[in-house]
Image (tube, rainbow, N blue to C red):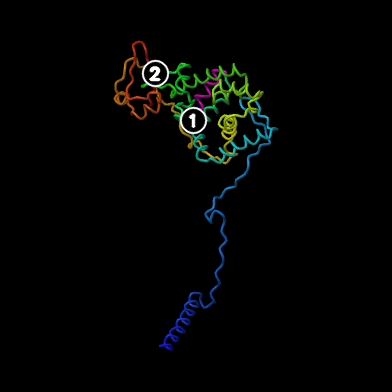
Amino acid sequence: MKHLLSGIGIGLVFLAGWLVLASSNGQPAAPPVAEVTTNADEGQLPQKVRPVDLDRPFDFAGEALPMENFDVRERLDQELLRNAYFHRNTLLLLKRTTRYFPTIEKILAEEGLPEDLKYLAVAESGLDNVTSVAGAKGVWQFMAPTGRGYGLEINQEVDERYHLEKATRAACAYIKDYHKEFGNWHWVAAAYNMGGPNVKKWRNRQNADEFFDLHINAETMQYLFRIVALKTIMEDPESFGFELDAADYYPPLDQFRTITVEKSISDLGAFAEAQGTSYRMLKLYNPWLIDSSLPISSGNSYDIKIPE
């Protein structure tokens, strides 16, 4: 048996050698070559991660940030990096600009306010009709008492914090009041975030001449820097690696006709169907309609957008 196994082993060796020679046309087989791969071939992200250039001027609403202050540089750097490399979120913000910015920019210009204030809405809501944990709602994130105080209707059927045009007008009035009080856009941004009375309290308590001298809660400390970082990236997205074609942006909701309604609507679904649209489209164009019906008191009326 031992000799038989040895003979089989030798035969297998000769057979393997013959197969190698046959496959190489009689030439010895070449040794295997180590394959050189790139980082992408190895499954690593093919990207270069670089710091943001801070050796340039930065401002909000025409008021410069003191970039010679190392603390200011570092706080801005944190927000620039956070948003430049938060790809999904920043990409969504860019896509939404075509839906929201034209309306906001037009109203800011009509109200005589700096266009940079549109980035306050970006920082507040991400250009979306969201609700915060504290109950603030809409693109401008109004709390209910503040919204009502600036003329917005808020009840079980209607919430004009979700009405882009009306909420933007209210935000302009609110911001103007803060600018009259503080006289500086940096302070206005802080006041919008944490409330004017709180800003005044901490400013006086700490003898802070400028917003950058305040040492308060982390959210307000970074709020202005978040706005400036978003402005910087969104004004020149290509330099931060965000490449979008015109078709990538979300379309503005500007194809509609407006009808004035003076009588109560018991069923908005039936109303939408009668107007040649769907309940879903009616809500997208009129997010301030928050219920399935719309009671209208005598002498009152609403303008409703009907998509075409």
The location of residue 305, given as percent across then percent down, is 39, 22
Residue lying at the far right in this picture: please name it.
Answer: 68
Query: Measuring 40% from the left and 23% from the top, which residue is drawn there?
Result: 288
* Range of residues picked out in magenta: 101-112
Query: Measuring 39% from the left and 18% from the top, which residue is drawn there?
Result: 303
- Residue type for callout 2: Asp
Point out the image quarter for the C terminus: top left
Residue lying at the far front in this picture: please name it.
Answer: 205
Q: Nearer the viewer, mark 1 or mark 2?
A: 1
**Earlier residue among tags 1 and 2:** 1
The location of residue 272, given as percent across then percent down, is 32, 25
Foreground residue among 255 and 237 = 237
Name the element at disc 2. strand
Name the element at disc 1. loop
Relative to 187, say whether 230 is above or below: below
Q: Which residue is mark 1?
A: 127
Is 110 a magenta residue? yes
Foreground residue among 213 and 271 = 213
Relative to 140, say whether 43 is above or below: below
Point out the image quarter for the N terminus: bottom left
Q: Tally the numbered discs.
A: 2
Residue lying at the far top in this picture: please name it.
Answer: 299
Q: Which residue is mark 2?
A: 303
